[in-house]
Amino acid sequence: MQARDDPDVAPLLLALCINSTESLMLIQLLSRIPGLKQQGVVYVSDKHLKATNTNTKETATLARRDNHPRSLINDFGVVEQEFIDVLSQIFKHKWIRSDLLICLLGKNDGGYTSIEKRAFREVGYGAGAKNVFLAEKEISPHIAAELFHGKLHGHTIDA
């Protein structure tokens, strides 16, 4: 068995570090190893979150607990926990920070405000993402994989 496939390796490696700065540096280093990269797409609608791991094609869906008549986000903490819950189902290495594309679907009368976009970007970072990209329309996992591999650039993908 390779070390990268062993879920018990991360705590052991982190235990070898003397302080939290070294732990953070180790996690950042491990996140750059190609076999350990985690990349996914989260589709946000008013009724559910659907997440897809672009490497393994594994998907998970979660019914939304946070609902607002005019916006996709009402309570920041609730939405962040929803992201943590759905991402934990598609990523097997919880200690590796992922690349994440968040697709905002629905409730788009007049476009999303910069506050809504920033809130979703912060939710992505709070859920453990290393890089967060936003799209105002549905982007296929195949196109997202191209984004993650450096073939597309930017932090907001326009519709």
Image (spheres, helix red, strand yellow):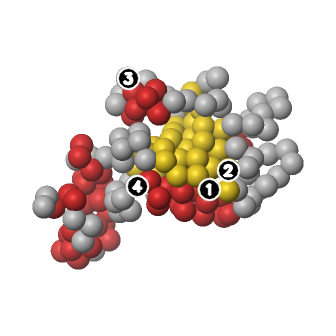
Q: Using the numbered discs, state the Cα–Cα distance from disc 1 to disc 4 in whole angstroms.
A: 15 Å
Residue 61 falls left or right of residue 69: left
- The residue indicated by pointer 2 is 48
Q: Determine the residue positioned at 48% across, 44% down.
A: 52
Q: Tell me the mark number nearer the camera, choosing from 3 and 2.
A: 2
What SS does tag 1 mark? strand
Whichever of callouts 2 and 4 sits on the residue coming sooner in the sequence is 2
The residues bearing labels 1 and 2 have C-alpha atoms spaced at a distance of 6 Å
Judging from the image, what secondary structure is the residue with disc 4 in?
Answer: loop
Residue shown at the point (39%, 27%) measured from the top left: 146
- On the image, the x and y values in percent for residue 42 come to 55, 44
| Quadrant of the image occupied by residue 112 | top right
Tell me where residue 128 appears, x and y as whole percent: 46, 57
Mark 1 or mark 4: which comes first in sequence?
1
Marks 3 and 4, the one that precedes in the sequence = 4
Mark 4 highlights which residue?
91
> Which label sits on residue 62?
1
